[in-house]
Each structure stands twice: as structure tokens, then as C-alpha cells.
Amino acid sequence: MRTTTRRRGAALAAALTLVAALGGCASGGTGAQATTGSCTNEIVHPDATQVTLWAWYPAVETIVDRFNQSHEDVQVCWTNAGQGADEYGKFSTAIEAGTGAPDVIQLESEILPTFTILDALVDLSEYGAGDMADQFTEGAWTDVSDGDAVYAVPVDGGPVGMLYRADIFEEHGVEPPTTWDEFAEAAQQLRDAGYDGYITNYATNGGAFNYALFAQAGWEPFTYDSARPDRIGIDVDTPEARKVLAYWKDLVDRGLVSTDDAFTSDYNTSLVDGTYAVYIAAAWGPGYLSGLSDADSGARWAAAPLPQWDPENPVAVNQGGSTLAVTSQARDKEAAATVAMELFGDMDTWKVGVEDAGLFPQWEPMLGSDWFRDREDPFFGGQRTNADVFLDAAAGYEGFTFSPFQVYAYDRQTQALYDMVEGDGDAADALATIQDSLVRYAEQQGFTVERGPGSTP
């Protein structure tokens, strides 16, 4: 018993250190001060129980106002504590201090295990969240639950598709690919036809992006059960991952794919100036892309399903997505659970989320609505991108297990992939390096590690 407690304590300390480091290296936060005592929205019913919320969703103030107008007993006091890493760093500081966390917090689904191991999140099944499972896509619910425990309520997701420059493909007489074999052929055909750009970019710093590519081939790197937080299965270096990474390394070596870091100014320019013919993107990608683009550029974009390894057995994957979780410091956990479960609980609110915030819902009533399915996207020439691409991708995603030290895992992957594309290493070397570093790190932090095929903690 003493050994298990010691290992758990080490794992908790490691998680805190990682999240604090993440916050420390992030760019400056946006929005209001990160305190639980100051609202940046109007409280409609001042005598009601107030629930503090940290969230960075676009249009969140409108969404909060709608909730406060429709709930007389509970009111949301919203603060933007920064986006992603900024918020996580502040949350980890509050966890370590034992005070200062909000009642409800927006968290990306991939970061949930990092905070569940810290006992920082409330199991919402105690407040009826388990009864909501049928309201969400299978993959989204898998990502927020562990057995009967529910650690967050899904909000938006990132089912992945292929956005491509229809004008570039047509100009060079190349058909848009539907499989990865065709994708490699199209890359060479574009080059042979005189296209001087790249079919796409392979970003070594794209943590979630690369996880999605690996997962499409059947990669399952971690086995983790929050009920046994001192044990983890790590199986990163697999035949599936080697196949995917070797594929991209070959395209890089042939000069058909660039290796720019994602989300830099140069990368953003290349997305819209014709340097890349394809943008492999989650459902939030069209909004990101259209925000960068010049309407008068003459570029014509279209959306298609993600290319497949086996078209007879298509696999859908997800990149990104967020949730609402109740923190263990919540003063009134039942009221906080109400906010987490009902903030995005009706069609009109979700229309705000879709139209004003660019969110892709994981809420089945919206996904099944004619309004959402038949929406035409002006940026894609009126194409119904939800119906054509993203609804099927969302329905097909089955969920993914992340590690409780995901920040470190992404960091090690980024370094190993960068070394591979910039040096003489190959896919096997890169994955072996990642595997060894993660096993070594987990053991140093006190985890019992199971490795190899079928690893189970």
C-alpha cells in the first residue's frame, strides 16, 4: 500500500510540474483577469447561486448570457483565463495552492487525464451526467468517461477531413485523392505537371495532428485507467505507426511535402498563397482557413473525406475538441454540474456556437438537424461540408486514450520527428526514441509500465 501511494504521489507531482511548465512557456493570455471573483458578463439574477467559469470559446459571453437569462436559480460568472496552455498553467497553480480554481473549466479532451490524476475534476456521474451519454457522439463520450465515471461534458470536436485547392488540382489535371496511395501519386503528378508548391505540409510540431494520422492506421499508444492511476500501458513503437511515419518520411525525402512548423506566420501564409494544395484539417479548419484568406485571391477550395489506408474499411479520426469539467474546488458542485451539463443545452445556443464561434458540436440533436447538415459554406462555394465530410467523420470516431502526461508525450514526439525529417533517421528510429523516452519518464515518475502489443495496466 505504501508503494502504491508513493508512486501515485510521484505521478501527481509529475503532472503538476508538466502542466505548470506548459503554462510558463505559453504565449500571453487573452481576455480578462483569471480570478473567480470578477465576472466579465452580466448577472441577471443576483440572488441566485453563482458558478464561476473559465472558458475561451469565441462568443462565450453570448452563450453565458443566454444561460443566465434562462436559469433563475443558477448564474454563470465568466472569466477568460487565457486559451489552452495559458489557462492550464493557471489551473495547475490553483490546484497546487488548493485555492483559486473556477467552479467549471473548459478543457481540451486530450488534457483530461492530466487533471484526473490530480484529483482536480469531479465525477459528474454523481449528478446525472451518465444519463446524457446518448446525447453525444460515441467518440466524444468515450473521451470524457472512464467506466461509469464522467469527468467532463463534451462540447465541440475536430473530426478530420481533407481541404484542397480545387483550382490547383484542375489546372494541373490531377484528381483529388481518396486513399493515401492516391495521395502520394497525386503529389508526384502535381509536381510533374509543373506545380511548384507542395501537396501539403507535414508539421512535426503538430502533436494532435500526428496522433490522428497514426490513429487512423490503428495506433493505440496508451492504456490508462483512472481508477488505477499508478499504472500505464505504453505501446508507441508499433507496425501501424511505423507504416504511417515511413509514408510521410518518404514524401518529405522526395520533396513533395514540406515540413514547416504549424501555426506560424509563414505557415499561415503558405496555407493561402498556393504553396500547399491540401490542408488536412479538423472541422474547425475551414473557419481557420477562411479567416486567413483573401476573398479576392481567386483560390477555390473544396472539402473531401480524409484519404484512407483501406477504402473498404474507412477509419475516422479526430483532432482537438473541448469539454466543460467541474473542478474539485467548486463551492457548489451540484450547481456547477448544472452549468457544465446545460450551458450548451439547446438548439438556439448551439446555433450561436456554430455561426458565431465556429464550433463543431458533439451534441447529437444538433448533428441530426436539417439546419446543421444542410448548411452551405460560402468559402467553399456553397458546398455542404458537414453533409459531405464532417458528419460522417464525427459519427465514425470511436474515441482515443491519451496519457496523464500528454504534454511531455507531445514534446518528445515533436523532437523525435523533427530530428527524423532534418537528419538521416528513419521512422523506426524516431518511434523507438519516443517509446524509450516515454517508458523511462513514466518509470521515473513512479508509474508501473506495461509495454508491447496489447499492453494493459
Image: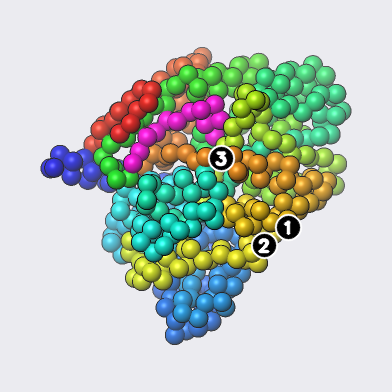
Q: Is residue 228 magenta?
A: no
Does residue 207 show up?
A: yes
Task: Say which residue label 2 marks.
Answer: 351
Residue 102 at what x, y percent from top left?
40, 65
Indicate the secondary structure of the residue bearing disc 3.
loop
Which residue is pictured at 65% across the width and 67% down the height?
348
Task: Say which residue label 1 marks.
Answer: 371
Residue 379 at what x, y percent from top left?
78, 48
Pick the residue in front: 59 or 315. Answer: 315
Q: Earlier in the sequence, mark 3 or mark 1?
A: 1
> Residue 356 appears in which quarter of the rendering?
bottom right
Task: Tell me if residue 426 comes above or below residue 51 in the rendering.
Answer: above
For the record, the magenta segment spans 212-225
Q: Earlier in the sequence, mark 1 or mark 2?
A: 2
Q: Nearer the viewer, mark 2 or mark 3?
A: 3
- 231 relative to 305 in the view: left or right: left
Which residue is pictured at 41% across the width and 62% down the height?
128
> Residue 38 appears in which quarter of the rendering?
bottom left
Q: Amino acid at mark 1?
A: Trp
Q: Amino acid at mark 2?
A: Lys
Residue 66 at what x, y percent from top left?
59, 73
